[in-house]
Image: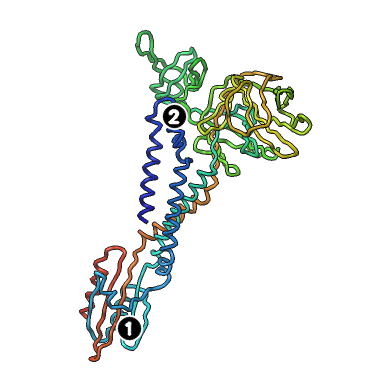
Amino acid sequence: MKFAVWLLVVIAVLALFALVLEEFLPVGASQSNIISLFQLSDPFRSLWFRIILGLLTLSLTVCIIERGPKLIKQAIKISLINDIESLEKFNSYIQLEMLNGEKRVVDHFRSLRLKIRSEAGDEKVIIGASSGRISRLGPLLSHLGMLLLIIGGLIVSLTGQSFQLRGSAGETLKHPDMDFNVLIKDFEIIYHPIAINQWVELSDGRRGKIVSLSGDSAQVRFSHGSGNLQDRWTAVDSVKNNFLLSRNGQLTPYQGNVKSYVTHAVIVDAEEEQSQTAIEVNHPLRYRGYRFYQSSFETGGAKSIVDTVSVRIQRNDTDLIDVDLCLAVDTVSIWDDYIIVAERFLPDFRLDLNMQPFSASGDLNNPALQVSLFKDSHRVGKKWIFNRPFGHMGGDDLPFTIQIIKLGGIETSRAGYVTVLDVKREKGGFFIWMGILFATIGVILIYGLQFRQVWAVIVNNKDERCTIHLAANCRKTDSRFLDSFKNLRSF
């Protein structure tokens, strides 16, 4: 058990260190060799964190196997001690002599609302009594709950998914890990009603702060001239709190008056539209184990649509062909025995913090095409290809060299707001919730109930008097409970 406690301390220290590390790292340090070696950019999915969790899982499992049967036995059955020497080792041990000792001891135990178990012999009677035995399951359930929490954490660390989806109204968002799509119907910014202390824009374009409201009128205070403040009463209907600001050359909404950001989306599964759902901050969309969170939004820039991507495929020095891959067509045959499939196109390829590909914008800054290669109905590999050598961007090694040479059917338009959704999928949720349940029940049993246990060995003497050996065991200090046995002398 001490080993598990030390592991918990190590995990807590390392987790705290990993959480605050990025706050003190200089720009670009996340790409350093040390950060990469110890996977500190994503510590909770690192190998060392999983090893520590595995050791803690092993330690808790051994502890449960070792202590579990004993705790279960104590919860189910009242124990007996027939060895006087064992009773003498308790701090609460007392020895009494009295007439009719067995009846007096049993009556006293019953007055304390203890459940009694006894065994009688020729020369002595053995009695055991207890209350709150169910609390003995508390440590077992709390350990089991912690074990389930760690198992759930390991499953999340090993199988959890995290990526982002970006899209504007009317766009269908896809991801290779999802076997369904998300259709963005609309993105909406909801503003608070006009109120005092809000910054607003007047009909003449000037901006100021509302300092008072009276009926249908608002008193707006704005700067006039060289820092002088000027108040102006105007109709509430003539001011608006959803004005735009120019930032980095783009118009973006003033967010000081925003109440919520809402993405209206539809899950498209098996080519059938499901009911429309609003994805709002703190109100994610849950579907088939995935959770879609409203993360942020971007001011829409260019939106590029490409019909075909021409690629150059080179097998060796002599075999070289150009192929037009239409994104709307499933397969294209090459060299008779291979089939190439265009699966996904990103106009501005980037990798997020979780090393997942996304398009940073709708401009054709870094076009990338994900292709799959098949031979005899078996997938040979899948890889991202670019219009110039770009290094290794993940995927399988293909038997050919493939490069984008031309984009066809390009249509560019200006998009509205682009919603950004954080998508997470964690398969260990069942273990985590069961762990929380068991741990909670265990804590309630430990601290909500009091386990009390007492043993008595009554030895019959020749002069019809009895020698009574008593010892009590309490999980909590209960002086009144222990003193009650000393008061048996008054019988």
Q: Of callouts 2 and 1, which one flags the residue occurring earlier in the amino acid sequence?
A: 2
Q: Is residue 70 visible?
A: yes
Residue 151 in the image, given as x and y percentages of width and height: 49, 51
- Extreme-left residue of the structure: 490
Residue, x 24% and y 83% (percent of image)?
467
Q: Is residue 279 left or right of residue 80?
A: right
Of residues 158 and 201, the one drawn nearer to the viewer in this rendering: 158
Q: Which residue is mark 2?
A: 32
Residue, x 36% and y 63% (percent of image)?
449
* Residue 178 to residue 97: above or below: above
Give the secondary structure at mark 1: strand
Of residues 269 and 158, the one drawn nearer to the viewer in this rendering: 158
* Residue 431 to residue 463: above or below: above
Residue, x 36% and y 13% (percent of image)?
229
Residue 25 in the image, given as x and y percentages of width and height: 39, 29
- Extreme-front residue of the structure: 317
- Name the colour scheme: rainbow
- Extreme-top residue of the structure: 225
- Give the label, 2 or 1, closer to the camera: 2
Q: Amino acid at mark 1?
A: Val
Label 2 Cα neighbours within 10 Å, binned few <14 / some 14-19 / many ≥20: few
Q: Is residue 66 left or right of residue 98?
A: right
- Extreme-bottom residue of the structure: 463
Q: Quadrant of residue 222?
A: top left
Q: CA gap, disc 2 to disc 1? A: 75 Å
Q: Tell me, yes or no, whether the two marked residues, 2 and 1, touch with CB atoms within 8 Å.
A: no
Of residues 293 and 176, the one drawn nearer to the viewer in this rendering: 176
Q: Quadrant of the C terminus?
A: bottom left
Q: Which residue is mark 1?
A: 125
Give the secondary structure at mark 2: loop
Of residues 306 and 15, the one drawn nearer to the viewer in this rendering: 15
